[in-house]
Amino acid sequence: MSELAAWDSFYVIIGSAAGALIGLQFVVMTLLAERPRLEEEAGAAFGTPTIVHFGAVLLLAALIRAPWHGLAYPAVLWGLMGFGGIVYTVIIVRHIFRQGAYDPVFEDWLCHVILPLLAYAILAFSAFAAPRHERPALFAVGAASLILLFDGIHNAWDTTTYHIFTKPKAIAVASRDSAIGQSGQAKKEKS
C-alpha cells in the first residue's frame, strides 16, 4: 500500500530513536541503582511509564513497517494500543497519588498524564478514521508517536536530573535530621 510505504523512513527514524532511548534509560537506571532509595512507588509513577511510552513508539514503528496489504489490521492494532495506553495512564495517575516521595507540579501532570493520555487517545480514535481517511489517520499515528517520543525524552531527562540533583539533597537532609535526632536522644538518655 503506497500510503504506508510513504511512512517507512519516518518510522525507521523514530523506531530507532525509541529503541536507543530504552537502552539508554536502562543504563541510567543501572548507574543510579547504587544510590539509596526513598520510595519504590515513585518509580512506578514516574520511571516505568517512560519505558512503556518508548516501547509503544517502538511497537508502532514495527507495526507500520510490517508488510501489510492494507490499513485495516494495523489500524485495529494501534487502536488497541491506544485504548490500552488510556487504561495504563489511569494506572499511572493512581501511582502518582500513592507515592509520597515527591509532590507533583503542573509540569509533572502535563508530561506524565495529559500528553500520554492525548497521544493514546489520538491512537485509539484514529483507528476509527483509518478505513475512510487513510492519510489523516497515518498523520495522527505519526503525531501520537512523536508526542510519546518527545514526552518520554522529557520524562527521562526529568527523572535523571531528579536523581542527580534533588534526591541527594533530600537524602542529606534526612541523614542530618536523623543524626540530630540521635544526638538529641543520646543527650536525653544521659540526663
Image: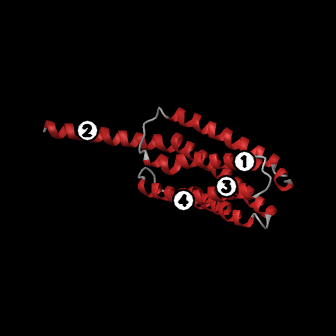
Residue at which label 1 appears: 61
Front residue of 21 and 161: 21
Q: Quadrant of residue 37?
A: top left
* Sequence order check, earlier mark of 1 and 4: 1
In 3D space, how far apart are the residues under numbered discs 4 and 3 (Cα atoms)? 15 Å
Residue at which label 2 appears: 182
Q: Nearer the viewer, mark 3 or mark 1?
A: 3
In 3D space, how far apart are the residues under numbered discs 3 and 2 (Cα atoms)? 58 Å
Q: Crowdedness of circle 1 by 10 Å Cα count: few (<14), some, many (20+)?
A: many
- Describe the element under mark 4 as helix, strand or loop: helix
- Residue at screen point 84% across, 54% down: 1
- Quarter placement of the C terminus: top left
Front residue of 3 and 118: 3
Front residue of 109 and 69: 69
* Sequence order check, earlier mark of 2 and 4: 4
Q: Crowdedness of circle 2 by 10 Å Cα count: few (<14), some, many (20+)?
A: few
- Describe the element under mark 2 as helix, strand or loop: helix
Q: Residue most toward the left?
A: 191
* Sequence order check, earlier mark of 4 and 3: 3
- Residue 55 horizontal/vertical position (percent): 63, 46
- Residue 92 horizontal/vertical position (percent): 51, 55
In 3D space, how far apart are the residues under numbered discs 1 and 4 (Cα atoms)? 21 Å
Which label belongs to residue 87? 4
Q: Of the residues shown, which amino acid type is indicated by label 1?
A: Ala
In 3D space, how far apart are the residues under numbered discs 3 and 1 (Cα atoms)? 12 Å
Q: Crowdedness of circle 3 by 10 Å Cα count: few (<14), some, many (20+)?
A: some
Q: Of the residues shown, which amino acid type is indicated by label 3?
A: Leu
* Sequence order check, earlier mark of 3 and 1: 1
